[in-house]
Image (spheres, rainbow, N blue to C red):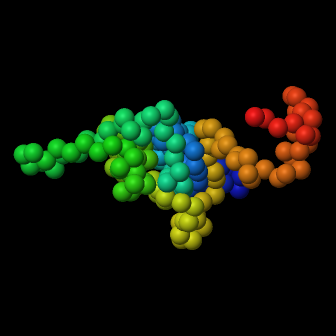
């Protein structure tokens, strides 16, 4: 077997670590992409009941973006198992308690509903900001593309770029809007 063939086999069967930035991303759309990698569907050797998925390190889960008014409307249900133990928590309250829990629940529900789900969830590493332990970061070799681009704030754009941007109207210098 040639060296390149051996390298190809190792790359196919080996576990790859991916980095995914959750900043300004919808966690439910991103969860499908993350679940795709966790289950190993991106590999040519994928089979439903085998554990061939890769690791995913999700950073900046504190800065996720929910569409519309879902922060006030989305409700998470939990029951303790005792009578009267049902609780409903709004998304913004749950996110304030633990910034990683919404992403974790979204990925959990995006995975296949079978016995491999818990093993695949162990390969998901979620961090509320971009401070990742060096022990984990040294394993990361690939990066997943974000679903939507992160918008740039106007105060972060250099002044010369703003001044040279094409203008629709060329207002006089002494014009004041009243």
Looking at the rendering, which quadrant does residue 169 occupy?
Answer: top right
Q: Is residue 148 above or below residue 51?
A: above
Q: Quadrant of residue 122?
A: bottom left
| Residue 31 in view | yes
Q: Looking at the image, is 162 positioned above or below residue 172?
A: below
Q: Position of residue 118 (x, y in %)?
A: 34, 49
Viewer-nearest residue: 133 or 164: 164
Picture quarter with the C terminus? top right
Residue 74 x/y as whole percent:
36, 36
Q: Position of residue 148 (x, y in %)?
A: 63, 38
Where residue 44 appears, as percent x and y from the top left, is 56, 38
> Residue at horizontal 71%, vertical 56%?
3
- Pick the residue in front: 84 or 121: 84
Residue at left offset 36%, top offset 57%: 97
Residue that appears at 37% across and 44% down: 91
Q: Residue at x 58, y 49 (%)?
A: 23
Whether residue 49 sits left or right of residue 65 in the image: it is left
Task: Confirm whether residue 108 shows in the render.
Answer: no
């Amino acid at each position: 077997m040639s060296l390149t063939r051996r390298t190809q086999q190792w790359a196919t069967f080996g576990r790859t670590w991916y980095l995914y930035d959750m900043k300004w991303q919808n966690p439910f759309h991103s969860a499908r992409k993350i679940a795709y990698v966790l289950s190993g569907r991106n590999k040519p050797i994928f089979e439903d009941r085998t554990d061939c998925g890769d690791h995913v390190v999700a950073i900046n889960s504190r800065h996720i973006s929910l569409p519309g008014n879902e922060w006030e409307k989305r409700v998470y249900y939990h029951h303790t198992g005792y009578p009267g133990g049902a609780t409903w928590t709004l998304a913004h309250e749950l996110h304030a308690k633990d910034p990683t829990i919404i992403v974790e629940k979204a990925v959990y529900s995006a995975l296949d509903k079978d016995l491999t789900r818990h093993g695949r969830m162990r390969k998901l590493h979620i961090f509320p900001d971009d401070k990742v332990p060096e022990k984990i970061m040294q394993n990361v070799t690939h990066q997943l593309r974000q679903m939507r681009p992160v918008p740039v704030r106007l105060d972060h754009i250099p002044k010369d770029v703003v001044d040279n941007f094409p203008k629709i109207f060329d207002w006089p210098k002494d014009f004041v809007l009243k």
